Amino acid sequence: MAARSSIAIIGAGSVGSAIAYSLLLRQVVADIILVDIDQNLCQAQVQDLSDATFLSNVRIRQGGVAEAQKADIIIITAGAKQRPGDTRLDLIDRNFKVLKSILHSLQPIRSDAILLIVANPVDVLTLFAQRLSGLPKSQVFGSGTLLDSTRLTNILAGKLKVADYSIHSFVIGEHGDSQCVAWSAATVHGTPLLKIIPLTEAEREEIATTTRQKAENIIKVKGFTSYGVAAVTSRICEAIIFDHRSVMPLSHWQENLDCCLSLPAVLGRDGIISTFPLHLDEKEQTFLADSANGLRKVIADYKEEL
Ligand SMILES: NC(=O)c1ccc[n+]([C@@H]2O[C@H](COP(=O)([O-])OP(=O)(O)OC[C@H]3O[C@@H](n4cnc5c(N)ncnc54)[C@H](O)[C@@H]3O)[C@@H](O)[C@H]2O)c1
């Protein structure tokens, strides 16, 4: 476990508490601080989670903004979640206000802190957080399509009957309805995936749709998703704390697209080190441009407030 490291999670609901659970089981940091506007809920989550700390020696406690300000990584999950039928973009008004008030109360924020946005719509909130936090853009990013990519990889691994980690496949663009599968960049242990399994256009579309709609199907029944996002968030935190330089699709600033969206990024202790080049075919480039276009339109409505 990394020495003297701490992670603050703001928002101790279904997602925040699952992230804390995942971080403590994987011993990513020594200290986890849970913060929520609902003090009673936060206290109960900490009590419940502390029953699991015997497995890992990680310390977990309830905190306020003053403690969160000092953390190495601050994860933001606070905000409204989708109701059945909502798109992630439907959450924007409510979650912009929540994010704004949290970032205001976090000032002065540690200049080397990493701000990891998980609340939705994650791409738009990541851009807002970059503008409002005062931190360098490389230190403010979102979990983006890492979760969608693990969903995609899992489907492909099932078809190929190989372990998920033998496949490199990415969902890029918006963590939402305009996301796109980068089929031309998918490989299995270095061999182009479509050479091994020549999926038809219709089969590819079906896999992309299943990937995109997975969250909605879960939300319809249990009201929220939490385990997958918790697992990918702890993977992101590991890459930061241990300076792994892992390449993963994360929502980060794209100068040429003038917004934040997911493309593979190299991630280490200082945050996003670079965008990893991805060779997309023409159709994928068009999808990505459309995804960026949609996000820019949404952001434009908030120009005055940033
Ligand atoms: N990025 C992803 O892949 C992904 C996946 C799943 C969910 N999410 C998003 O995560 C967010 C949280 O989902 P959830 O299921 O945990 O919701 P939830 O309602 O269970 O939890 C949200 C928590 O935020 C708290 N909160 C609200 N305003 C706050 C403030 N100003 N300060 C501190 N705490 C505050 C609430 O009290 C609540 O406990 C949603 O926006 C959801 O869409 C993202």
Image: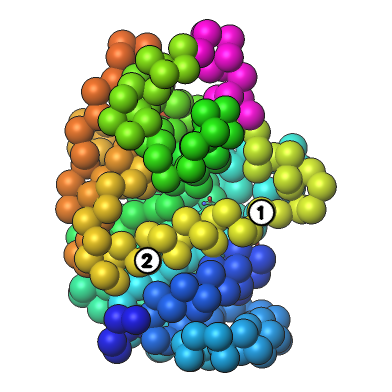
Residue lying at 43% horizontally and 78% vertically, measured from the top left: 27
Name the residue nearer the viewer: 246 or 215: 246
Query: Can you tell which mark lies on residue 167?
Result: none
Q: Which residue is mark 2?
A: 237
Farthest residue toward the right? Answer: 221
Residue 289 position (above or below residue 102): above
Q: Mark 2: which amino acid?
A: Cys
Residue designated by label 1: 225
Crowdedness of circle 1 by 10 Å Cα count: few (<14), some, many (20+)?
some
Relative to 210, 181 lies left or right: left
**202 is higher (above) or lower (below) than 30:** above
Name the image quarter holding residue 234.
bottom left
Name the spot of residue 130 as percent of width and height, x first: 30, 56
Q: Quadrant of ligand 1?
A: bottom right
Q: Nearer the viewer, residue 175 or 217?
A: 217
The verdict on residue 153 being magenta is no
Q: Which residues are drawn in magenta?
A: 199-210
Q: Position of residue 95 (x, y in %)?
A: 55, 56
- Comes first in the chain, label 2 or label 1: 1
Q: How many marks?
A: 2
Kindly identify the residue that appears in the image at 77 percent across and 53 percent down.
223
Examine the rendered structure and indicate whether residue 177 appears above or below residue 231: above
Q: Quadrant of the N terminus?
A: bottom left
Name the residue at the front extreme.
161
Q: Is residue 204 magenta?
A: yes
